[in-house]
Amino acid sequence: MSVSFNEDKQNKKVEELRQKEEEQVAQILSQKYGVKYIDLSGISINTDALRLIPEDVARKSYVAAFRIVGKKVFVAVYSPQKEETQAAIKSLEDKEYSTEVYMVSRQSLEKAWSRYKDLSFAMETKAGTLDISNEEVEKFLEQVKSIEDIKNLVEESVKVQRVYRISKLIGIIVAGALSTKASDIHIEPEEGFARLRYRLDGVLVDILNFDSETYELLLSRVKLLSNLKLNIKENAQDGRFSVKIYNDDIEIRTSTLPGSYGESVVLRVLDPKSIAMPLEELGIPEKLMKIFMREIEKPNGMILTTGPTGSGKTTTLYAFLKRVSTSEIKIITIEDPVEYHLPGIVQTQTDNEKGYTFASGLRSTLRQDPDVIMVGEIRDGETASIAIQAALTGHLVFSTLHTNNAAGAFPRLIDLGVNPKILTSAINVAIAQRLLRKVCTHCAKKVPIPENKKEVVKIIIDKIKKKEEAVLQENEVMEAVGCKECNNTGYKGRVGIYEAITIDKAIEQIVTENPSERDIMKAAQPQHILTLGEDGMQKVLAGVTTIDELERVVDLSLEIDRDEDLATPAEIKENFDAPLPEAEAITPPPPEEPKPETL
């Protein structure tokens, strides 16, 4: 009788016994050290937790974070008394995580460490959230000094033929936008390739082109992150996801639009740090600042900021809110989305799918007895009507409106159905604003005012001097050059230009007559507040920006023409002071002689 010996089966059995013995040893040691024991062989490793500790640190310290719930992290350790292990746990606690430590075997740690191969620079964790490792971002930001650096990293990532290269690519693109302070990321398909562009200081800048296959994978991943439908390609879609960097949540709004060669993708980066600017740094002229301070200190009324998308309206409103915020008043905001979290303020976000719109949110807000309300945008007649009523009933209301200038706010609200008779009683001030790129201080140079610009500069300077006593140098302006510091654009950073109309008797009277913008401009002229073009020209002559940049943002021909038929301040004063014309002397006719009676 022959006996067969199965070596593979025996080896497998021996390995199982060894593993079981190793787990028993770990369990015994856990009791010795007073630490809970766990066997990770049947536990799913949470990648969100795993990536809190870099792989090289985890292996050196014999630890692995395997689960996370909120700010609580569950950590597996091989030797709790090991110095490196304690240092790794402390690094988590320094980041404000609470830790719960478990004793594990070496094979459990090996299982957790094996999951690192699934991680990349950026990691999709669930729909609507893109997490980027703090350590990786710090490392990446050290590498990025220019757009050329971003281009090289993206090209390197595209060439990597790995499953996770798309996650890494998204991480690089988003982190690159944050490092260069880009406000938008544009991914645009062309025939045979796709183009990546960043909007830097309001202007689109080409980064690089990449292949169509990578674009298709990138589009699918962005849609998954943003909770968009993968199968819908013929209609536009909107979504959002968030990025966690240094424990800060940065929201990114996604928009897809069908085109000739595929869907164009725009990612709007809402970085709280770019929005949290003090009022004094916005570029508001001194005279206008005094007006704003006077109006926002009033207990009721409406402060309206107007301008196109990306003109800095939300930043201005946040600066106002921070200025009026005290522990004695209640402030509630209704936004879409909440771009910057302000301490001590109740901030709510609209959700059209659930029926929480600006109008319904404003109604609910009024039941909370607020002192100050911020409505992110007045888009329809219902929201406009409720906001006006709130301003009339003891609330200070901040809001935005899409019009080209301050005068346009009044016709726009009348078009939305607001009663013109109560409009001026509700509004304190209507503001218009734009953002200009500032010249790079490292490379800009002074040049004489170009010959073809001298006439327009002189006309606007004369207009400024009629409105206020201004000391302006009228010979030189700055010219953008371009260097490494400004990514060869010649500009770095932005500053606001402003105009405003306050409510006085002339505005009250004209608004009730269903006026045009030009009628309102004429009525507002005695206020002597600079227009957008005039404020911009002051900044040009002060060396803050260039004439070319001002002309890119403001149509200076309109600035010249808009007041050509309006009386100047001197003419207004002259007409006001002039004596009334004397009535002409009227010589009465001589009395008629009585006619003889006719018999």
Image (tube, rainbow, N blue to C red):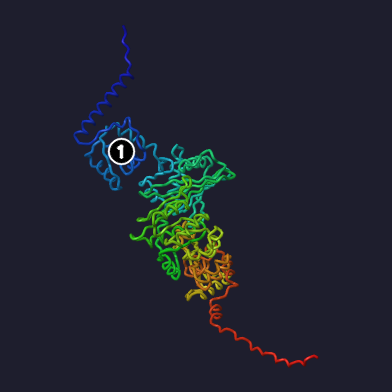
Nearer the observer, 182 or 504: 504
Residue annotated with mark 1: 64
Res 385 seen here: yes
Nearer the observer, 566 or 435: 566
Res 481 seen here: no
**Residue 198 percent coordinates (x, y):** 49, 52
**Residue 587 percent coordinates (x, y):** 67, 90
**Residue 32 percent coordinates (x, y):** 19, 34
Q: Quadrant of the C terminus?
A: bottom right
Is residue 45 placed above or below 487 in the rendered structure?
above
The part of the image, by quadrant, that contains residue 598 is bottom right
Residue sitting farthest toward the right: 599
The kind of residue tagged 1 is Ala
Residue sitting farthest toward the top: 1
- Residue positioned 56% across, 43% down in the render: 235
- Residue positioned 33% across, 35% down in the render: 112
SS at mark 1 in the image: strand
**Residue 257 percent coordinates (x, y):** 55, 46
